[in-house]
Image: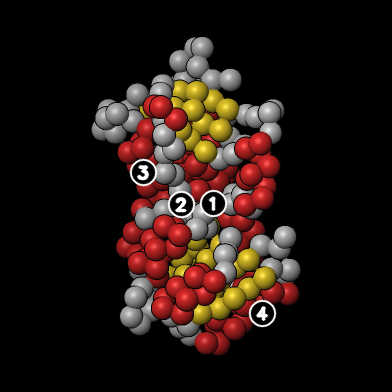
Amino acid sequence: MRARIVIVEDEPDLRDAVAEYLGAAGYDVATAESAAAARSLVETQSFHLAILDIAMPGEDGLSLGRWLRSKLPIGIIYATAAGTALDRIVGLELGADDYIVKPYELREVLARVRSVLRRVPQPKELQDKRAGADRRSVAFGPFQADLDGRLVTGANGVVIDMAKSEFDVLEIFLTRANRLLTRAAISEAIGFTEDPESSRAVDIRIMRLRKKIEADPANPKFLRTVRGEGYIFSLPAGDGN
């Protein structure tokens, strides 16, 4: 099944250009000129990825993104105007998988779409993986991370609500446990270019992740900061599979 993408953008020329380009690249693309139109689409169709303009008349892209995440296991790329770093940071804090800065090149959009979709399991693929017997999983404290199913459970099997971008970071640490990872190494593993904005994006993802797996995020047991160098995920001997 081809990945389905919805583009929510109030500028018609830009919206049509992105849709045409991604359609030519092999994706099924739908468009909406507003958050209200996007909500109507989602009521009748499912999507794997949404590209959301943040600054739209009426409901903005950040609010729409929160609503989409409550409805679908969907990847989200926010589009923001140049110079509005605050919007990008807020978007990352809300669980965005990536962002693009307007004006952008269509080739950049395609590269980011491909990167995010690699981390978004197709519904059937996810079911097949969960049904499989040979799985990669790691236990740490009360948590069990199913790396193939991209699922984390806590005490009593309760599923931990985790954005795909947060799971990406967790998987990087769990597959490299007890090793110091610099921000540059984490950025490269995620698929970011190394720059100050990417370093901030890594820090935001780690902050969100700590809130979900640490009893005391200010004094983390697992995901520790090594001042001036990076981060290390402490996995005690005997934990993991």
Q: Which residue is mark 1?
A: 192
Q: Is the residue under label 1 in contact with that under label 2 (CB below 8 Å)?
A: yes
Q: Is residue 154 visible?
A: yes
Inter-mark Cα distance, 2 to 1: 6 Å
Residue at 63% across, 45% down: 126
Whole-angstrom CA distance, mark 3 to mark 4, is 35 Å
Q: What residue is at 44 percent from the left and 37 percent from the top?
A: 159
Mark 3 → mark 2, Cα distance in angstroms = 15 Å
In three-dimensional space, the C-alpha distance between marks 4 and 1, rounded to whole angstroms, equals: 25 Å
| Quarter occupied by residue 81 | bottom left
Count of numbered circles in the view: 4
As shown in the figure, which amino acid type bears the numbered disc 4? Glu
Pointer 2 or 4: first along the chain: 4
Using a 10 Å C-alpha cutoff, classify the residue at mark 3 as few (fewer than 14 neighbours), some (14 to 19) or many (20 or more): some
Q: Which mark is residue 20?
A: 4
- Element assignment for label 3: helix
Mark found first going from the N terminus, 3 or 1: 1
Distance from label 2 to label 4 (Cα)? 29 Å
Residue carrying label 3: 208
Q: Residues within 10 Å of mark 2 (few under 14, many from 20)?
A: some
> Crowding at label 1, few (<14), some or many (≥20) Cα neighbours within 10 Å?
some
Q: Neighbour class for label 4 at 10 Å: few (<14), some, many (≥20)? A: few
Q: Amino acid at mark 3?
A: Arg
Q: Residue furthest bottom?
A: 13
Q: Is residue 123 above or below residue 103?
A: above
